[in-house]
Image: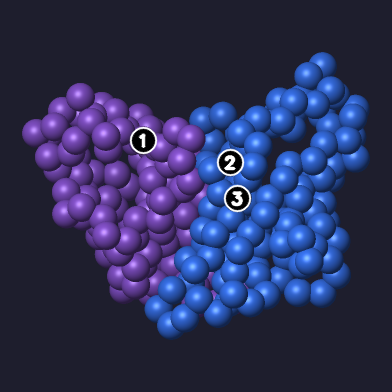
Chain colours: A purple, B blue
Amino acid sequence: ETGVTQTPRHLVMGMTNKKSLKCEQHLGHNAMYWYKQSAKKPLELMFVYNFKEQTENNSVPSRFSPECPNSSHLFLHLHTLQPEDSALYLCASSQEYYRIPETQYFGPGTRLLVL
Amino acid sequence: AQSVAQPEDQVNVAEGNPLTVKCTYSVSGNPYLFWYVQYPNRGLQFLLKYITGDNLVKGSYGFEAEFNKSQTSFHLKKPSALVSDSALYFCAVRDPYSGAGSYQLTFGKGTKLSVIP
């Protein structure tokens, strides 16, 4: 494994549910990312945190709410999702967001199905 | 704006044959280029990157990629394919001149590589 863990690995939720995805990195990195991976589409960057501060929000709907309590942990809180939000959600980390060049290390992802 | 294209959704190759997975990019300056691989039910794994210097970059698992500025390409290659190389491959680009506040990687849609025994 890459040193980035994600839980749960699979999640089924109804549109009225509230759930959270968790990501933890054991690499001593300072930047963490949430990506959405849908079939036959490029990876979509959702959020970036650098030293616990949110630095990127790519016009993500407010039904997705990130939280980064420290440099090792990242959460994605979900509520009132839509079926089109079903996808693989990937967490990644890197040394820093602004360091050039960067290599990102990915977790295994959470496979989300919204019914 | 930066962009990357992987023109082939799928590549099939016989085991032992050389393989190539294509990637072209568009940036305003000299790019940073990456290849990642995703095995089933796994996250993306870093393979190699081009930052500057030698146009031929060697990476993990015997893979290499050649940066060609005139053709704006960064094709992934391996001399002899293994069945275990079957996976989804992603090219990504970062434009060092993308402007303040944006240091994002832009990923291609991915190419599924199938190595046939």
Q: Who is closer to the viewer here, A75 or B107?
A: B107
Q: How many marks?
A: 3
Residue that carries the numbered disc 2 in the rendered image:
B110
Task: Give x and y (percent) for residue B51.
Answer: 71, 71
In the image, is A7 to the left or to the right of B72? left
Q: Confirm or deny contact between disc 2 and disc 3 (CB under 8 A).
A: no
**Numbered badge on residue B5:** 3
Badge 3: few (under 14), some or many (20 or more) residues near its Cα, within 10 Å?
Answer: many
Q: Position of residue A51 (x, y in %)?
A: 38, 74
What residue is at 63 percent from the left and 45 percent from the top? B6
Looking at the picture, how far across and down is residue B64, in whole percent?
Answer: 82, 51
Give the distance between the C-alpha atoms of the residues marked 2 and 3, in whole angstroms. 9 Å
Q: Chain of mark 1?
A: A
Q: Secondary structure at mark 1?
A: strand
Query: Where is A63 relative to B32, above or below?
Result: above
Determine which of the numbered discs, if any, sits on residue A87 in the image: 1
Quadrant placement of the C terminus of chain B: top right
Label 1 and label 2 in one chain: no
Q: Considering only vertical position in the picture, is B93 above or below B53? A: above
- Residue type for callout 2: Gly
Horizontal side of A106 relative to A8 (left or right) equals right
The local secondary structure at tag 2 comes to loop
- The chain letter under disc 3 is B
Q: Nearer the viewer, mark 1 or mark 2?
A: 2
Marks 1/2: CA–CA distance: 16 Å
User: Mark 3 touching mark 1, by CB under 8 A?
Assistant: no
